[in-house]
Amino acid sequence: ISPLLSILYIHRRMYREAAVKKEEYQVLEELGRGRFGTVFRCFHRTSNKFYAAKLIEKRRLLNEDRRCIEMEAKAMSFLSPHPNILQIMDAFEDADSCSIVLELCQPHTLLDRIAAQGPLTEPHAASLLKQLLEAVAHCHAQGLAHRDIKPENILFDEGNKLKLSDFGSAEWLGEGSSMSGVVGTPYYVAPEVIMGREYDEKVDVWSSGVILYAMLAGFPPFYGESAPEIFESVLRANLRFPSLIFSSVSAPAKDLLRKMISRDPSNRISAHQALRQSSFH
Ligand code: AMP
């Protein structure tokens, strides 16, 4: 058969399989909305288990969006199983939509937790940081950088275990080569990314350090009224520990923050080294 016909054949078979798979899931209530799709709780009839299904309408997707969705599914399957990385259970696609089935988490992210509780206690922050760094060190050891680590992308399963999610901006680490391109979210993005320089997986260590600061303080270390103001503050990288909040934070926790939120990536510790220092409380 001609290449075109074989593509049509593959698609037809894939779409038929998708129709069968779709039938296996009963879609329940909405859990949240993301950049590309809506996440629903769903019931898998064959296993009698509940999952989360991300449903993405293909109509409005740009090529860059497709790349993110493909990367998300690819990276999650490549990294699974890991206790602190959100597990992908299934993925299927028909002519109109894609569905990604994920392990089910609580609908509240780390951002909601910090917003509701304010600063977390140091032992609580240390326990969450350790789980986050386990996930980040695993990504780096497998040759992937996440590139968009932020509290909104940190979920918790029913047993309260931390799960790193949203691998749409992830990138493979080349042999000795660096990445470029501005990705990430203003409060958490590393200075070398804003400067438009080439960078490596240490950008994830910076973001994880900013998250540790936000967990201990209840607010991020670099802020401003607008994205450009936040970027300026990140570029200055003037890390302060206001005594009102930080007088009760231990010296090893502050030491770890300085090592993770180091402006120069060559002086910044690796995720693996940070993990070894993460039991600071
Ligand atoms: P996302 O498209 O990945 O940004 O997800 C949008 C929102 O859906 C998140 O902020 C969560 O509130 C919710 N959500 C995403 N994945 C899950 C999941 N596996 N379990 C429960 N809720 C989820």
Image: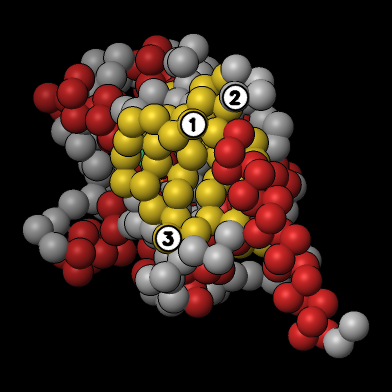
- The residue depicted at 18 percent of the width and 52 percent of the height is 223
Residue that label 1 marks: 26
Q: Earlier in the sequence, mark 1 or mark 3?
A: 1
| Residue appearing at x 40%, y 12% in the figure | 123
Q: Is residue 241 above or below residue 277?
A: below
Q: Residue at x 53, y 56 (%)?
A: 98
Horizontally, residue 145 falls left or right of residue 115, namely right
Residue at image mark 3? 57
In this rendered view, identify the residue nearer to me: 34 or 27: 27
Ligand 1: image quarter: top left
- Amino acid type of the residue tagged 1 in the rendering: Gln
Secondary structure state at the residue bearing disc 1: strand
Q: Give the residue number, with chain letter if any, for mark 2.
A: 45
Q: Quadrant of the C terminus?
A: top left
Dot 2 or dot 1: first in sequence order is 1
- Horizontal and vertical percent position of residue 247: 21, 20
Colouring scheme, one of rainbow, by chain, secondary structure, one colour: secondary structure
Question: Between 225 and 242, which is closer to the camera in this rendering?
Answer: 225
Percent of width and height locating residue 219: 20, 37
Query: Helix, strand or loop at disc 3?
Result: strand
**Does the numbered disc 3 mark a residue whose Cβ is under 8 Å from ligand 1?**
no
Give the structural element (helix, strand or loop) at label 2. Answer: loop
Categorize mark 1 by other alpha carbons within 10 Å: few (<14), some (14-19), many (20+).
some
Residue at (71%, 32%) from the top-left corner? 81
Q: Quadrant of residue 230?
A: bottom left
Quarter-of-image position of residue 11: bottom right
Q: Marks 1 and 2: in contact by CB < 8 Å?
A: yes
**Is 231 on the left-hand or right-hand side of 52?**
left
Mark before the other along the chain sequence, 3 or 2: 2
Residue type at mark 2 is: Arg
